Structures are given as C-alpha cells and as structure tokens.
Image (spheres, helix red, strand yellow):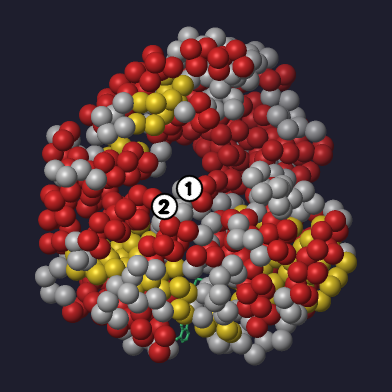
Amino acid sequence: MSDVSLTDDQKILVNADADLFVAACPGAGKTRAMVARFLKRASEEDRRGIALVSFTNTAIDEVRTRCGDRSDVLSAPNFVGTFDAFLHRFIVTPLYVAFFKVHPRYVQSWSEVQGTKFRMATGKSADVDLEWFDFDDQLRATLDMGRVDRNFGNVEAREKLRGLRLEAEQRAAQVLRSLLQAGTVSCDTARFLAEIWISNDKYRPILGGLLRSRFAEIIVDEVQDCGREELLILEFLRGLGIRMVTVGDLDQAIYEFRSATPTKVLEFGTTLPLQPMLIENWRSSPAICAFNNSLRSRTMIERPVGDTAELGTPIYLVTYAKPDEILPSALSISKQYEVHTDELVLLAHRRKDALRAAGMAASGELGSNRVAAVADAGLKLRSAETDAVARRDAVRRVEKAILAVLADGGDLRFKSIEGACAELGIDERRLREVSVRMAVSLAAQGKTRSQFANEVRAYFRGVQWAELNVVEPELNGLGKLLQAPTEEVWNSISNCGRLPVQCSTVHGVKGREFKGVGIVIPKSLKPNEESGRTLLDDWEHGHDSESRRVLYVAGSRAKELLMVFVHQQHREQVARILEGSAVPIVQLKV
Ligand SMILES: Nc1ncnc2c1ncn2[C@@H]1O[C@H](COP(=O)(O)OP(=O)(O)OP(=O)(O)O)[C@@H](O)[C@H]1O
C-alpha cells in the first residue's frame, strides 16, 4: 500500500502538517490517500498513536484491507475502527468503570435487551419503551410523546399514558439505572454519557489527559456523517492539540435521520486551517460525473480522470408505466454495454421500489399469510442479495406468525413482538432462534403452496416448545392457523428465490461501486413535509435536501453505465433537468 501512486492533490492530504478539512468528490481516492497518511504517520510517531475512524464497519474493513501487509499498524497505540468504537473505548469505558464498578457491554439499541420495556395501566396497549425518554445529567427521565410507537395503542391509551407521565418517567429512570449498574449500555446512551462527561469540568481534564497521552492524530473518514456528539468530541480533541484530519463529501450526507448535521460539519470544517478539495473522480465516466455535478449543492465540479474517463456511454433515461417493466429493460441495456448481471444493481430511495424493480415482492405486499412469511424469510435469509434490514423484517414476520399460532389465533394487533412475548411468557431471544431455524430449514422453491403449507405445519408439530419457555401447545387448528397462501402471493415469493440482479436502498450501498447502476424514480414521490417539494423539485431548483443527496449517492456508485428508470408521470421533469444541466442522455420508453 505504501507505494501506491498519488496525485498532487492526494499528496496534500497525506503530507499536510496542519489540521485539515478535505472536501472530496465520489471516487476521489480519499480512502487511498487516508490509508497512505495513516501508514506514514503511524511510522513517524514512536510513542503516541494515530486513530482512523469512520462510520460503518464496511468502511473500516476496507481501510484494514488496504493496509495490506502493514497490518502491524492496526494495533495499539494506533486505532482503526468506527466512531462509536472510539467513543466507547477511549471516552466512555474509562469513566464508566470508575463510576459503576463494572465493565460496560455495548449494545446497538435497547431493543436488543430484555427489560427495557415496561407495562403501565394504559388499557389495551403495548409496553412503554425506554427509547421514548430523554435523560438529563442526573439520569432523570422526560417522556417524549412524539416518540411513542404508532402501534402503542388507541387515543384513549395515549391519553392514559399522558396522565401517568410522572410514574412512567420514574420507572424509566429506574430501568436506566438498573441497566447501567448491570453494565449494559446502548450506543445512544454511550453518546449521551460521553457528552455529559466531556462537558463536565471535573471529568473533562481526566479524559483529556488520557486522550492526549494516547493519540497524536485523528483521521476522520466520512466526516459529513458527524452529528452533534461527534462534533463535540472532535472539538474536544482539537482543543487537546491532537492533529485533526477530516475528509468527506457534504453532498453524501444522507444520515440526517440519525442526527447527522452537515451544516454544522461545514461550520466546523471551515475553522480548520487547510481546506483542500479533491475534484478528480477516478471511478466514473464523463456522463456519470455530469450527472453527479447536476445534483451537487456546492461549488465543486468533479472531473473524470480514471480508466473510464474516455467512455462515451450516455445516461439512459428510461420511462416506464409499471414497475415490472424495469428489470427486462435494465438487463437488455446492460447486455448492450457488456455489464454482467452480477455487476449491476437497482437502487431506490425506498426498499419496496428497489425490490419491485428487481421483480421481488416487498414483505409488506405478502399480506398476512403466515406460511408465506416463513417461505419469504427462508428465501431472504439464504440469498446473498438480501440486506440486513430486509432479513430482520422477514424474521420478525416469522416471529409474529409463531406468536399468532401460539396465541391460538388470538388478537395480537396491539401487541409488539416484545409485548406478545411477555404476555405469552416467551423468551424473545429464543423465539428469534426458533424463527430463523424454521425459515432456513424449510425451502419453498420447487414446491406448491399447499405442499409448503403442510411442511410448515409439520415443522410446528416438531418444535421443542419447552425451549421457548412455553408449555407444549395443543396445536389443534393448525390447518386454519397456517393456511396456504394465495396463488398470487406464492408466485411472487417463488420469484424472489431467483432474484436476477442485486437491488438495494441507496443507504445500503454507500461507499461501494458497481459497473452498472439503475436508479428507480417511482410514481409516488412524497413531498417533504416542511417544504412541500418533491425530490425532483429540489433537484430542478437547486435546493439542498437529503432526498436529493440520496439520489447523488446513488448515481455516484456507477462506473460505466447509469440508467434512470423514471415513472412516465415524471419523465418530462427529469428530462428537463438533465438536459438543462448538459448531461448526455438517451431517452427510451419501455
Ligand atoms: N492516484 C490514483 N491513481 C490510480 N487510481 C486511483 C488513484 N486514486 C484513486 N484511484 C482509484 O479510484 C477508485 C476510487 O478510489 P477510492 O475508493 O479511494 O475513492 P473514495 O474517494 O474513497 O470513494 P467514495 O467516497 O466515493 O466511496 C479506486 O479504485 C482507486 O484505486
């Protein structure tokens, strides 16, 4: 890795000896340059370490891989990991151990831990969830009614909860204390503790001393995804004199729902002395770079310079009327440009639009049939193309199916899975294990719907229910509780096992690249609640919005071929935008 070639601009990132905020276009080689810097700085510093942090495990794995035979530099005093792992290891854990006398165990969210929900006398309603409360530095709770789950209960139940607010807040505070005393911390709570301790005059110097003696420099990848707490930590580290190298692309900020604040990141970045730009795109063809430029909200104009820089392939603007027209058209255009199906991906803002385009039913369209839920989960769990969210949703549908059978068809409408488990006395973790095992042991492919329904019923009869803490159920009416799905539903499930191309949400492919990309712009485009504008309005009139940035991330994953599948209702607008931005296009109608 140390002898990779670098451009002069990339060398600035590698060699600068002042704090840096680097704005890089997609495919600018920022990972390449950051890794080169990390290796160089790690060998220069003999006592203190260099930290390289990013936001996803995929990004971190990529960095580790690119360190190649220099894997020795990945260990202490250096650190390569996610921002959360950095925050846990170097900020929260040291003080946590001192406070709670126990080593913390971090979980992604409270939903992974039993006991983070509790019942209140709110009538026909689900459990109250710890995630609905804010806490102050004394760990006092405040209930945020806006966060109460949609399925919690009816208006009456909500009113009752409002009336019991004080009691609920006391219980939430108690639950949080018990969790912390047991050493269990969610990632959000870890951030909250970090913020409290960094802002506290007594603890700040303790943490400062530890961090200053450990690190000489921190390199932050994807800095645009920083939220309030990350920026607070960066300010803190900078104040300690730790060299700060931040790299990102503000137009790729697509995590505002997870509290990323690109405007604040820009404010922070402009306080750093060096702010070079990397505007050469080593990944994408000229037409794709033009597409990216049409979507960028800032002044940077990227230039194609890599192996694809001479490619004359235009952007395909394909108009469709029905989603099932997309796949054949995507395959035929790809074939023309020698893009193999496994080098192609179909992307959409919403999972269901991507799935439909790839000829796969979204789980929501499978109806409530329990046998269908098992078949669908089996196919999704076995398929390498299914992302983590789709897998989790599919397994949850099987969990619900099992619970419904165990409740003997009883009404679980107002119950969360957790609530239903509590009512039936079932261990949630075991339920998940049984659901996954059932889904992967039963293969729907090649079977008729009634054959498969019989298999599911037989499987139910063979489950060791004691494993779930459940008294052996009677299972008398299985034929009724586990009916075969309709022919239509069965066909759509069977197709999913033969998924011909990869499909994903845009968020699911961030940081990746593909020879060919198809973006789906569906018929229904939800206007933004505040601005009233759709994604296309934002694109056309130059408004910086998250949905527009999502489209930018989607297009910038493509190396050679970019196809935009637009519903006929929006064709005119998209064509106008692309032509107005001088993006070379070919228009097709399927
Ligand atoms: N100076 C260079 N010479 C040759 N190839 C390069 C150079 N810089 C980058 N590349 C190649 O360009 C591609 C994109 O580089 P890299 O993945 O580092 O970009 P990135 O900025 O991290 O991309 P993104 O943020 O969009 O995911 C890689 O295949 C990389 O090897």
Q: Nearer the viewer, residue 340 or 9?
A: 9
Q: Nearer the viewer, residue 70 or 372?
A: 70
Task: Kindly report which numbered mark, 1 or 2, lies closer to the viewer in this rendering.
Answer: 2
Give the residue type at disc 2. Gly
Q: Nearer the viewer, residue 433 or 95?
A: 95
* Secondary structure state at the residue bearing disc 1: helix
Q: Where does residue 562 sit, x and y in percent of width and height?
A: 69, 72
* Secondary structure state at the residue bearing disc 2: loop
Residue 227 numbered tag: 2
Task: Please give the name of the residue rendered at 85% of the width and 53% of the height, measured from the top-left corner.
Answer: 322
Q: Where does residue 19 sit, x and y in percent of width and height?
A: 29, 72
Beta carbon at label 1 within 8 Å of ligand 1: no
Q: Nearer the viewer, residue 99 or 268?
A: 268
Task: Please give the name of the residue rendered at 52% of the width and 74% of the height, measured from the top-left corner.
Answer: 25
Report which quarter residue 141 is drawn in: top left
369 on left or right of 553: right
- The answer to the question of whether label 1 and label 2 lie on touching residues, with beta carbons closer than 8 A, is yes
The tag earlier along the polypeptide, 1 or 2, is 2
User: Does the rendering let one see residue 22?
Assistant: yes
Beta carbon at label 2 within 8 Å of ligand 1: no
Give the residue type at disc 1. Arg
Q: Where does residue 443 sit, x and y in percent of width and height?
A: 64, 42
Q: Badge 2 local density, few (<14 within 10 Å), some, or many (20+)? A: some
Tag 1 residue: 258
Report which quarter residue 17 is drawn in: bottom left
Number of numbered discs: 2
